[in-house]
Image (cartoon, grey):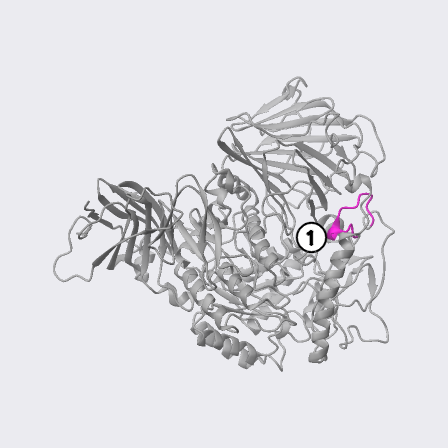
Amino acid sequence: MPSLLFPIKPCPTLSSFTLLLLSVLILISVSNLNGILATSPKLPSSNNSSSNVPSKIGSGYRLVSIEETSDGGFLAYLQVKKKNNIYGSDIPSLRLFVKHETAERLRVQITDAEKPRWEVPYELLPREKPPPLKQPISKSRKLPISVSKISGNELIFSYTADPFSFSVKRKSDGQTLFDTTSTGSDPFSSLVFKDQYLEISTKLPNDASLYGLGENTQPHGIKLYPNDPYTLYTMDVSAIRLNTDLYGSHPVYMDLRNVGGVPYAHGVLLLNSNGMDVFYRGNSLTYKVIGGVIDLYFFVGPSPLDVVNQYTSLIGRPAPMPYWAFGFHQCRWGYHNLSVVEEVVENYKKAQIPLDVIWTDDDHMDGKKDFTLNPTNFPRPKLLAFLDKLHAQGMKYVVIVDPGISVNSSYGVHQRGMANDVFIKYGGKPYLAQVWPGAVNFPDFLNPKTVSWWMDEIKRFHELFPIDGLWIDMNEVSNFCSGLCTIPKGKICPSGTGPGWICCLDCKNITKTRWDEPPYKINATGSSAPIGFKTIATSAVHYNGVLEYDAHSLYGFSQTIATHKGLQALEGKRPFILTRSTYVGTGQYAAHWTGDNQGTWNDLRYSISTMLNFGIFGVPMVGSDICGFYPQPTEELCNRWIELGAFYPFSRDHANYYSPRQELYVWDSVAKSGRNALAMRYKLLPYLYTLSYEAHSTGAPIARPLFFTFTNYTDCYGLSTQFLLGSGLMVSPVLEQGATSVKALFPPGSWYSVFDMSQTVVSSFGKNVTLDAPLNVVNVHLYQNRIIPMQEGGLTTKEARATPYHLVVTFPAGATQGEAKGNLFVDEDDLPEMKLGGGSSTYVDFYATVDQNMVKVWSEVQDGKFALDKGWAIGKVTVMGLGGTPARVDIKLDGIEPTGVSDIFSNVSEQIYSEDSDVDGVMKSVMVQISGLSLPIGKNFAMSWKMGM
């Protein structure tokens, strides 16, 4: 669905010419609006100083007492030093809570000492609770203020009493990770804490590399760029808008430093759902938040993978995904009847392009109403027959659900919602808004009754049409109107004769409360728009009196949790959910796509940074609309996009109603690129699925920046044009129009092309290498010392999963000594849990060594029965990078040479170095392929042979 600032939803009565004209006007309006926003007046100096040196507020606080709690935490009390009224009155007395929650995690919370304040609900994001306010503490545990250091296993919390400031240091290297001290020369204030304005800052070293703070489209790449705006507040703003708060809020960053040649990473989370501006100046970072509490979590690292592991151990591990979710997905807003959908699926099959999942936007709905079917265009009997046909082929069907529930007396979903009192209210009545069906109410997912009602509606719809997953959209929340609205009398709204996104309700602005017009204006939508603009009024009320002002950015998160519960309750199967709006912890329940992008070369490039950021956010199942949501991409661009998008963790082609059709089979050249790139994706499915198990177990991203593996190699700290799948599979796509080659950075070591395994790049110290990349080619290389499981591919994941396995082993080029490792996880992917035990999964560690010309490859299996029962086996082993030139390969399996007639055969070929490789001209490297094997995945095996010289 399109973003409301650039909506392009069709009206069924418009002519083709009118549609074309509207399309052109929309593109012009986008350009004009971007220009208007770019030249809009600057914020007041207190908000967004043109000199980037904001004025200081107040004199901070002083610490007056500190006590130790029975659970090992520390409570301290702070008093304001000198009151002022900038952005409201200071809260005079604050409570500081400090606790080393684990050896790797420190929590520092600051809140009002007298009154409870809004926090992210513990029911939504389970975590330790601090002591209740005013909890009596035994005098024997009181500490003198002079005790200014609280040490844990890995982190040290230090403070200065007057004015109060604190720092966090890592024990192992003495690095200061966070330091709130404000001196006269610093461009930030000491601690500021008012009801609707919180400010806290940290100093940073100039050479720190920061990542995170989203969701936004970052034109400079994944690395945070000093003085770019970083506003966090969920809004339905198109992803084409740069440096603007988009669909999700993730107030977390990773800080990577290289100190004396040694890399160290740590993470910082400010757990707060209120709107905020974050000012990063290169040598400092300041949070300016319009409510809630300061609740900081510090993650010690020291590696990037450690940081994500520690972060997701707090917020929740990424959700297990069904195997089919790693197949290719096709969607379009505008598949206006079932025949069109059937035709798309058939055309993919005719073109021999892999496809696993077909999607429909709101086209299947009756009047754009959730949980309904259009009886004319998607008649249920034919739809069920089509679904049966899909399922027989192992394919799936996913449909969209928006949060807005149509206000309609004959619509059972709304009537049941009213009966259960599930909607957000304003003035005691359900808050009225407008989206695609017209007037709507929004469910309040903070209300337990709403969750039960939503689960029941999912069940009812599943009984009507047993879909395989749900796509939840527009959940920032998006609203075509602003303010307090009523349904107009005497006219139809929407009329059906104009654009469906134009507000047709009778509305008036709400400016009478401090919640609608807070004293500090965050840079919402990149233009300091009112925070209730085109969303729910921020003075509207949720369950238990919670204000939309506080809970706004949690809406999509709370809906995702409710949807997950609903799907999981259906048949006890593993849910698949795709959500647009996200918050801290969303990855525990859903996948994410990056929203409404454009079919441009810039958007192709931006997609990599956004994808990599979401891996850091704990949402590893992520991807962008391949070929762009609108307008139509060029043929060349669509070629390059599927070559990149085939390696997104979540790979889906999606387009809007106004764009001409852009399925991969539309152009012959794109079909060729799609067959090529997706064929490799489907061969790599065992590897991708094993990475998803790793993500679910440790939080490790599926797609990663190169610095996750090559942390010592500082040249890759800002690299945003390449990425890794797992620890060592590097994708180097073409991102420039007209290019037939790509300049790729190769960190030190040996790299092998997975498309042509004879091709080798050797980089001694790290270097840029120019690779051939004609139109239908994407470069993907596997790093040394790795073992990855592959299969033979297919047109569906079901078909691919039934083919023999292929182990690919890499050593440093010309190796006579070395070792490699890899793993494989397989399971019954319909089950809710993704874990070992219970006979429904198998895990295999693979090892390989070369030593004194002896090559060994073996496995160690856990819970092998599941894989044995499936009959899965390894048919081929390929080992690359071996030194020597054997005349023959005499194989031993489990220490015994095969006797009699055997299908096993070997092939030895010399590997070819790229022209830019660092080789001495003498070093030779060979690849050995052993085929005709039948080694059960579920059983330990050992293979060996001797290399001749």
Of 329 and 450, the residue lying toward us: 329
Of 433 and 853, the residue lying toward us: 853
Q: Is residue 95 left or right of residue 329?
A: right
Q: Is residue 854 left or right of residue 322?
A: left
Q: Is residue 789 left or right of residue 170?
A: left
Of 660 and 256, the residue lying toward us: 660
Query: At which x and y percent is residue 787?
Result: 35, 49
- Residue segment shown in magenta: 517-529
Q: Quadrant of the N terminus?
A: bottom right
State the residue at coordinates (73%, 65%). Answer: 28
Query: At which x and y percent is residue 855?
Result: 24, 46
Identify whether 114 is placed above or below 386. Answer: above
Of 717 and 650, the residue lying toward us: 717
State the residue at coordinates (26%, 41%). Answer: 816
**Chief SS of the magenta region:** loop
Identify whether 916 is placed above or below 635. Answer: above
Identify whether 395 is placed above or below 687. Answer: below
Q: Is residue 419 left or right of residue 799?
A: right
Dot 1 corresponds to which residue? Answer: 234
Amino acid of disc 1: Thr
Query: At which x and y percent is residue 655?
Result: 60, 68
Q: Quadrant of the C terminus?
A: top left
Q: Residues within 10 Å of mark 1 (few under 14, many from 20)?
A: many
Q: Which quadrant of the view contains residue 812?
A: top left
Query: At which x and y percent is residue 916?
Result: 40, 47
